[in-house]
Image (cartoon, grey):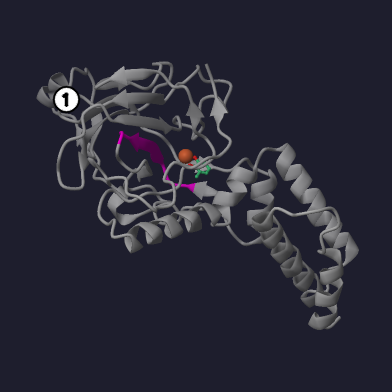
């Protein structure tokens, strides 16, 4: 079919038939449908192929994998790049780089002041102590900031989604102290892999891609008057460090990991075995008018 004929067909199909449409929704949906008509035409998509795709989407929804697919196809990274661009255009530069939230945050984690322990002690793993300061881009410490942290266990699984873990294991909200400092003890996470043979895995395979992420730790850092920061750090040395299926690695988010086996260092940390330490400071940008919201609305799991 000629494009002009497709457009004629679409014009009839997309005419409102019961009152005023919602303009933005209509404009976007009309455009997506038109683009898909063009794809069907250009690739001569057969009916069975079309319904295979519909069934795939149905199954992906049943598996609750749209969050993974959005990350894996690069949509989540693209949204970040666009937010970065909007901030830069508004003259808001510097600060800790943002990187994607991913689909595994759970709201409602326990709040601790200054410092806390994230792991429930049930798993053998390398002890990791991570600490640092939350500051304004001009260097002013931000006291009372909320550092929400979540990460996978040694098998790459997240509590809540992995029903074998205790509630809020490896998840906390840490409120920074008077100097803007936070500190937590946890266990070193492993990298993540999408569920084998699931919807995301099946798709990525057909794209010649894997579904692995390097080991990482997620953060939301927020304080009144500041842009909410959504970010992660990666664990240096991970084989997937620069090969993340979700495209979230950024140069400034790979802090050095210091390994401490010295008895004095172990004792000073209040521990009794060798441990890894990561120092990482967060720099927040001040909120400014006329910027897209840094607080992103999306469906998130919530636990009590
Ligand atoms: C993760 O742990 C994650 O952070 C992302 C972005 C996607 C899947 C799993
Ligand atoms: Fe993650």
Q: Residue at x 54, y 25 (%)?
A: 302
Find residue 49 and report its image quarter. bottom right
Tell me: residue 262, above or below residue 271.
Answer: below
* Left or right placement of residue 58 versus residue 122 in this view: right
State yes or no: residue 203 in magenta: no
Give the residue drawn at x 86%, y 57%: 17
Image label count: 1
The residue drawn where x is 25% and y is 26% is 144
- The foreground one among 65 and 193 is 65
Residue visible at 39% across and 21% down?
Answer: 119
Q: Residue furthest left?
A: 264
Q: x and y percent of residue 115 in the render? A: 26, 21
By secondary structure, the bulk of the magenta-drawn segment is best described as strand
Q: Which residue is mark 1?
A: 178
Coordinates of residue 105 in the picture (x, y in percent): 49, 33
Which image quadrant is residue 279 in? Answer: top left
For disc 1, the neighbor class at 10 Å (few under 14, some 14 to 19, many from 20) is few
Magenta-drawn segment: 213-224
Q: Is residue 187 above or below residue 213?
A: above
Q: SS at mark 1? A: loop
């Amino acid at each position: 079919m000629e494009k002009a004929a497709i457009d004629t067909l679409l014009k009839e199909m997309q005419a409102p038939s019961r009152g005023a449409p919602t303009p933005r929704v209509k404009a976007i949906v009309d455009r997506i449908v038109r683009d898909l008509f063009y794809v069907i035409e250009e690739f001569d998509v057969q009916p069975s192929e079309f319904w295979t795709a519909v069934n795939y989407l149905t199954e992906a929804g049943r598996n609750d994998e749209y969050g993974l697919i959005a990350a894996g196809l690069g949509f989540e990274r693209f949204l970040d790049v666009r937010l970065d661009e909007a901030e830069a255009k508004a003259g808001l530069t510097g600060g800790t780089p943002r990187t994607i939230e991913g689909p595994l945050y759970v709201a409602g984690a326990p709040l601790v002041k200054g410092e806390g322990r994230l792991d429930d002690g049930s798993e053998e793993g390398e002890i990791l102590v991570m600490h640092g300061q939350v500051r304004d881009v001009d260097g002013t410490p931000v006291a009372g900031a909320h550092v929400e942290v979540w990460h996978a266990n040694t098998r790459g699984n997240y509590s809540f989604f992995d029903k074998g873990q205790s509630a809020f294991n490896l998840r906390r909200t840490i409120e920074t102290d008077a100097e803007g400092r936070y500190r937590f003890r946890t266990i070193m996470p492993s990298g993540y892999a999408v569920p084998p043979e699931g919807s995301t895995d099946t798709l990525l395979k057909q794209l010649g891609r894997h579904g692995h992420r390097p080991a990482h730790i997620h953060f939301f850092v927020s304080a009144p008057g500041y842009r909410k920061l959504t970010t992660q750090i990666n664990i240096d040395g991970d084989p997937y460090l620069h090969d993340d299926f979700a495209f979230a690695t950024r140069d400034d988010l790979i802090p050095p990991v210091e390994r401490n086996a010295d008895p004095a260092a172990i004792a000073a940390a209040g521990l009794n075995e060798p441990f890894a330490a990561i120092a990482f400071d967060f720099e927040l940008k001040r909120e400014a008018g006329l910027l897209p919201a840094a607080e992103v609305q999306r469906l998130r799991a919530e636990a009590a």
